[in-house]
């Protein structure tokens, strides 16, 4: 049984990590979050120590280490812009880090983590859960067995409706979340490059507070992509069905169904990590580099390779010009 610490216990994704720690037969010794609404711990680890101040959490786990019962893994569920600092903390402590997406916001942060990892007994792991989704694994096997069928034409559409709270949280600040393409898109970009090879060309057609779209020229596919958190961009069939989320991948006009099967992907990720088979810095690098390029790209709104939804009217930022 391994001993875990968790940073970001009040976050949206933390319950998936708590469940994975428990269901892989391990124990959570300590958790930390500046917000104290962490009753979720009762469902999995009511005996875990909890701290709202990182300094006290640091002191507690250091005392464990000096007493001969160190933390083996730190699970990191904190806001995106804090990930690299918390991973560095884990490595310097001598533990391994299991970090939510995105591992870091900028490619040079990966270089710094690699250097620290090389001098630490611990390793850096990240959650690239779509690589473990049964439908995506089956698709990769199909593509590899049919490698002579030519270049694929792909359309990715992902709409995850969010309310106004999003813009006043850290998620709404590009400097903290990385923006739409990073915060909600990085899993999909990683998946696409895992399936079709690294990016050789790219265009960005839109990049705003509530949506992003563009085109990728991957080694084996052309990809039109559209990401949004605005419910006004939902297709009619989703609206009529009362859905707030829409996820679609078309490959040569054929829909790839993977709307279910997400329930145990964190468990699968943890199982691989505990066997020393998890995804690390090298696997995370291509998508981190891509989303950084997207953030810095010059927009080409009329390139002729736009996703069909890219022409929808842009919306005003909900708090733009309100003085707040």
Image: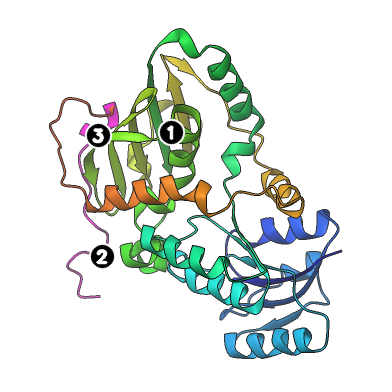
Residue 161: in sight, yes or no?
A: no
Query: In the figure, residue 219 lies in which quadrant?
Result: top left
For marks 3 and 2, give the one nearer the viewer: 3
Residue 191: percent from the left, percent from the top?
50, 36
How much space separates mark 1 and mark 2, taking CA atoms?
Answer: 25 Å
Position above or below: 264 against 77: above
Image-based side of 203 in relation to 257, left or right:
left
Disc 1, SS = helix
Position above or below: 315 against 74: above
The residue carrying mark 2 is: 319
The reply to whether the magenta stretch includes residue 311 is yes
The residue carrying mark 3 is: 310
* Mark with earlier residue (3, 1): 1
Mark 3, Cα crowd under 10 Å, few <14 / some 14-19 / many 20+, is many
Residue 204: percent from the left, percent from the top?
23, 40
Disc 2, SS = loop
Report the predominant secondary structure element of the magenta stretch.
loop
Image-based side of 136 in relation to 271, left or right:
left
Residue 277: in sight, yes or no?
A: yes
The reply to whether the magenta stretch includes residue 303 is no
Residue 206: percent from the left, percent from the top?
22, 42
Residue at image coords 67%, 44%: 265
Mark 1, Cα crowd under 10 Å, few <14 / some 14-19 / many 20+, is some
For marks 1 and 2, give the one nearer the viewer: 2
**Which sits in the foreground, 319 or 285?**
285
């Amino acid at each position: 049984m391994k001993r875990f610490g968790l940073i970001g216990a009040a976050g949206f994704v933390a319950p998936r990590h708590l469940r994975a720690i428990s269901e892989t037969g391990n124990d959570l010794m300590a958790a930390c979050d500046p917000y104290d609404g962490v009753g979720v711990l009762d469902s999995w680890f009511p005996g875990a120590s909890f701290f709202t101040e990182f300094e006290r959490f640091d002191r507690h786990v250091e005392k464990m280490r000096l007493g001969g019962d160190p933390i083996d893994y730190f699970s990191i569920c904190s806001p995106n812009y804090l990930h690299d600092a918390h991973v560095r903390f884990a490595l310097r402590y001598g533990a391994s880090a299991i970090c939510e997406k995105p591992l870091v916001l900028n490619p040079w942060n990966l270089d710094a983590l690699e250097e620290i990892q090389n001098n630490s007994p611990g390793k850096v792991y990240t959650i690239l859960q779509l690589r473990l989704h049964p439908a995506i694994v089956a698709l990769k096997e199909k593509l590899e067995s049919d490698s002579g069928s030519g270049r694929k034409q792909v359309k990715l559409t992902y709409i995850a409706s969010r309310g106004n709270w999003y813009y006043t949280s850290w998620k709404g600040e590009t400097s903290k979340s990385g923006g739409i393409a990073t915060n909600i898109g990085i899993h999909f970009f990683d998946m696409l490059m895992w399936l079709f090879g690294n990016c050789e060309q790219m265009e960005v057609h839109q990049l705003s507070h509530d949506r992003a779209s563009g085109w990728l020229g991957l080694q084996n596919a052309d990809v039109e992509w559209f990401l949004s958190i605005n419910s006004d961009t939902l297709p009619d069939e989703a609206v009529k069905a009362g859905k707030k989320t829409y996820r679609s991948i078309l490959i040569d006009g054929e829909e790839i169904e993977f709307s279910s099967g997400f329930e145990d992907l964190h468990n699968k990720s943890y199982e691989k990590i505990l066997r020393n088979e998890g995804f690390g810095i090298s696997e995370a690098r291509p998508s981190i580099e891509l989303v950084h390029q997207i953030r810095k790209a010059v927009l080409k709104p009329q390139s002729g390779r736009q996703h069909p939804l890219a022409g929808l009217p842009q919306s005003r930022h909900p708090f733009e010009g309100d003085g707040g």
